[in-house]
Structure formats: C-alpha cells, structure tokens
Image: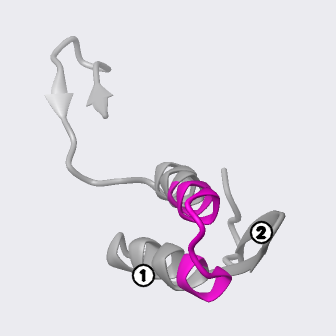
Amino acid sequence: MIDKTDGTAVQSTEMDKNMAMDIAMDMGKLLLKSGAETSRVEETMLRFCGGCGYSDLNVVCMPTVIILGDESTEGKN
C-alpha cells in the first residue's frame, strides 16, 4: 500500500485486515476450483490470516460456497 498523505510515497509492508481477507478468499476459491478438500481450504485460509496477525476469523467451506467471518468487534471495515 502507498500512503501519499504528505506528498511522498511510502511503501507499507503491513497488510490490513480487509486485504488479508480478500487474499484469503481468492486463495480459497483457487484451491476449491483446483479440487482441494474443503478442510484444506479452511486450514489454508486460517493459516494465512493468522500469519498476517488476524486470528479472530472463522472459515466455513463447502463444495459450492466459502464463508469467511470476522468475529472481532470492529468487523471488516
């Protein structure tokens, strides 16, 4: 992400929760389309989000749907 509030471009290495959830959903969709087991999809998404520092998420995956829920009080902004 680039912050241009003060006129200079600064590269941020920190990933916000919205971006982590979006990437996790993309990962889950790709895995599911590729034939991965639903439990593997859930575990991969949770591990990715946990690695980004967000452990307050839940994933439910079925063959036709993926649900990624945020249990924090703030939710997805």
Could you tell me residue 9's position as x and y percent?
A: 17, 20
Residue drawn at the location 67% of the way across and 57% of the way down: 76
Whichever of callouts 2 and 1 sits on the residue coming sooner in the sequence is 1
Residue 43 vs 45, above or below: the answer is below
- The amino acid type, in three-letter code, at marker 2 is Ile
Crowding near pointer 1: few (<14 within 10 Å), some, many (20+)? some
Kindly give the residue lying farthest to the top in the view shown: 7
Query: How many numbered callouts?
Result: 2
> In the picture, residue 29 is in which quadrant?
bottom right
Q: Which mark is residue 67?
A: 2
Which span of residues is magenta-colored? 27-41
Q: Residues within 10 Å of mark 2 (few under 14, many from 20)?
A: few
Q: Relative to residue 73, is residue 11 drawn left or right?
A: left
Position of 40 relative to 30 (above/below): below
- Tell me the residue that label 1 is attached to: 47
- Prevailing secondary structure class for the magenta stretch in the rendered image: helix
Specify the amino acid type for callout 1.
Arg
| Residue 67 lies in quadrant | bottom right
**Nearer to the camera, 52 or 41:** 41
The image position of residue 27, as x and y in percent, is 50, 58
Measured from the top left, where is residue 46 in percent x and y?
51, 80
Q: Nearer the viewer, residue 38 or 6?
A: 38
Q: Are marks 2 and 1 in contact (CB under 8 Å)?
A: no
Magenta-drawn stretch contains 28:
yes
**Left or right of 76: which side holds 45?**
left
Check residue 68 in the rendering and tell me which mark sits there, or answer none: none
Q: Residue at x 52, y 85 (%)?
A: 43
Callout 2: helix, strand or loop? strand
